[in-house]
Image (cartoon, rainbow, N blue to C red):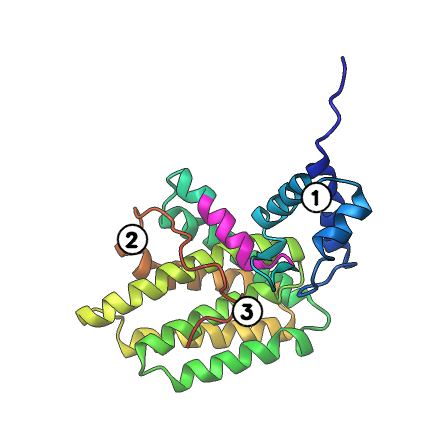
């Protein structure tokens, strides 16, 4: 069977992609001028432009048009994964209830990873404690409290130390945070937001989770996080369990840094 030679554009895109992923081209770097790239790869302008379109569609470059235009490298980030996963889930008609059920199983694993880190005192705990203190101070402000509570869970995942879980579970956290922030504003407007006692109960769970991570108690960290998620996700899930996942608003969102 005769194999077809890959198109020139795909070959050029593959070479440039490897340079980006290897770090030879870093975030914010400008690609060489089109004339220089055409000379390097011995390709026509249409082939080069198609190669750049491939990379732009993958989110690896941003092409600026005009006299001062050019291609700028954009390193893949977790929020890009959240956007892409959200599109796939939306296309498949997956609900936020499905995302919540996945988080209730997967996030506790991240809590265990965090508790298992030898360097947790310097990498995990400072950020969790900082957010927890801010949440305690904002407990009477439902909107701020919700944003900080979501940050706590996102930071728990993003500092767990397992890169695969950081990307995959982090994407689900971003999707759920978007849903929960929307729910919170509606609940606040309707006067139906969880009362102060319920918020303080959530804060106590966060405090105990920090303690279990600090002592390196993997089993208790996992178990507590699972119980806490069963309680804390219920409110937002109750109002949107059948609503299909949406990706709008995720691009440009810095991972773990919800707008405040």
Residue picked out by circle 1: 13
Q: Is residue 242 above or below residue 127?
A: above
- Residue 120: horizontal and vertical position, in percent? 67, 73
- Residue 177: horizontal and vertical position, in percent? 42, 62
In the picture, which quadrant includes the N terminus?
Answer: top right
Query: Which of disc 1 and disc 3 is earlier in sequence?
Result: 1
Q: Identify the residue at image location x=54%, y=80%.
A: 129
User: In the image, which residues are magenta?
Assistant: 73-87
Instruction: Please give the label number shown on residue 155.
Output: 3
> Can residue 53 be found in the magenta stretch?
no
Identify the main secondary structure in magenta: helix
CA–CA distance between discs 3 and 2?
24 Å
Q: Residue furthest left?
A: 190
CA–CA distance between discs 3 and 1?
34 Å
Q: Residue furthest top?
A: 1
Marks 3 and 2 close (CB-CB < 8 Å): no
Q: Identify the residue at image location x=81%, y=47%.
A: 40
């Amino acid at each position: 069977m005769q194999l077809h030679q890959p198109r020139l554009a795909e070959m050029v895109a593959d070479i440039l992609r490897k340079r980006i992923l290897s770090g030879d081209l870093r975030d914010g770097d400008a690609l060489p001028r089109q004339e220089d790239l055409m000379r390097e790869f011995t390709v026509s302008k249409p082939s080069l432009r198609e190669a750049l379109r491939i990379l732009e569609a993958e989110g690896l470059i941003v092409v600026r048009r005009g006299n001062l235009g050019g291609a700028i490298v954009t390193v893949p980030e977790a929020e890009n994964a959240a956007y892409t996963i959200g599109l796939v889930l939306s296309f498949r008609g997956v609900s936020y209830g499905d995302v919540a059920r996945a988080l209730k199983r997967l996030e506790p694993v991240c809590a265990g990873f965090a508790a298992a880190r030898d360097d947790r005192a310097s990498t995990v705990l400072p950020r969790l404690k900082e957010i927890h203190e801010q949440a305690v101070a904002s407990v009477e402000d439902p909107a701020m409290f919700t944003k900080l509570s979501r940050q706590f869970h996102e930071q728990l995942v993003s500092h767990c130390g397992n890169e695969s879980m950081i990307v995959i579970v982090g994407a689900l956290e971003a999707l759920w945070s978007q849903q929960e922030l929307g729910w919170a504003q509606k609940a606040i407007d309707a006067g139906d937001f969880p009362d102060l006692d319920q918020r303080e109960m959530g804060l106590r769970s966060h405090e105990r989770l920090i303690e279990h991570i600090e002592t390196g108690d993997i089993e208790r960290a996992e178990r507590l996080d699972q119980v806490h998620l069963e309680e804390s996700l219920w409110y937002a899930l109750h109002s949107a369990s059948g609503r299909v996942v949406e990706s709008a608003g995720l691009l440009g969102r810095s991972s773990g840094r919800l707008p405040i």
